[in-house]
Amino acid sequence: MIKINLLGESLSQAGARAAASEPAALYADEGARKTLPIAGVVVGILGAAIGAVYYLYLNNQIDTKKAQAAQLQKQLDELKPYIDLEAKFRKKKEELQNKEQVLVDLRKRMQLPVYFLQELADSLPDDVWFQSIQQNGMTVTIQGQARNFESINAFYNNLQQRTRWFKSVNYPGGQKDSAGNWVNFTITFQLQNAV
C-alpha cells in the first residue's frame, strides 16, 4: 500500500512562516527586555531624588526647630531671675495672707468669750447659779444650782432660743441636794462661732 503525504507541504510552509516570524518576535522581546532595566533605573533615581529632597526638607525643619529652641532657651535664661523673683513674691503673698487669716481668726476668737458670756448672762434666770463652766473644743458643760426645777427649765429654754450661739442643748435633768434646798443640774451645749 502506498501512502501519500499531502500534509507535508502545508506543514513545511507553516514551519517556514514561523521561522521567518521568529526573529521578529525575538527582537520585540529583546527590546522590551532592554527598556525594562532602564525604566527601573530611572524610577530608582527618581525615588532617590525625592527621598534626598525630603531628607533635606526634614533636616532644614530640624535645624529651624533647634534654632527656635536655642532662642527660647536664651530668652528663658534672661527671664529666669524675674521668674524666680515672681515665685518669691507669690510665696511671700501666700504667707502674708495666711498670717492675716490667723489674725482675723484670733480676733474672732478673742471676741467669742465676751459674746458667749454676754449671751449666757442674758439667758440666766435670777435664781440659778453656776458652780463650774468647762469648755472642750466647742462643747461647753455647765454645772450649777437653782432654787427649783422651773428656773432650770427657764434657763434651758432660753439657751435653746438663742440658736445663733448655742446648739444641741442637752439637759438630762436635775437632782435635789441632800438638804433638799437646792437643785443641782448639768447642761451641755455646742457653742457656735457666730461672730
Image: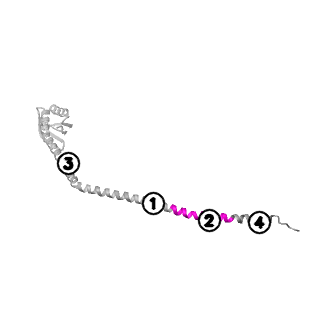
Magenta region, main secondary structure: helix
From which residue to which does the magenta span run?
22-43
Residue positioned 31% across, 57% down in the render: 69
Indicate which disc, 2 or 4, sits on the residue closer to the N terminus.
4
- Label 1 crowd (10 A; few <14 / some 14-19 / many >=20): few
- Marks 3, 2: nearer the viewer: 2
Q: Position of residue 86 (x, y in %)?
A: 21, 51
Task: Point out the tag, 1 or 4, that comes first from the N-terminus.
Answer: 4
Q: Residue at x 15, y 44 (%)?
A: 103
Numbered circle sitting on residue 94: 3
**Residue 29 locus on image (x, y percent):** 63, 63
Residue 171 seen: no
Q: CA distance from mark 1 to mark 4?
A: 58 Å
Quarter in which the C terminus is drawn:
top left
* Residue 159: percent from left, percent from top: 18, 34
Q: Within the image, what quadrant is residue 15 found in?
A: bottom right
Tell me which label, 3 or 4, sits earlier in the chain.
Answer: 4
Q: Secondary structure at mark 2?
A: helix
Q: How many marks?
A: 4
Q: Nearer the viewer, residue 98 or 130?
A: 98
Residue located beneath label 1 in the image: 51
Numbered mark located on residue 12 in the image: 4
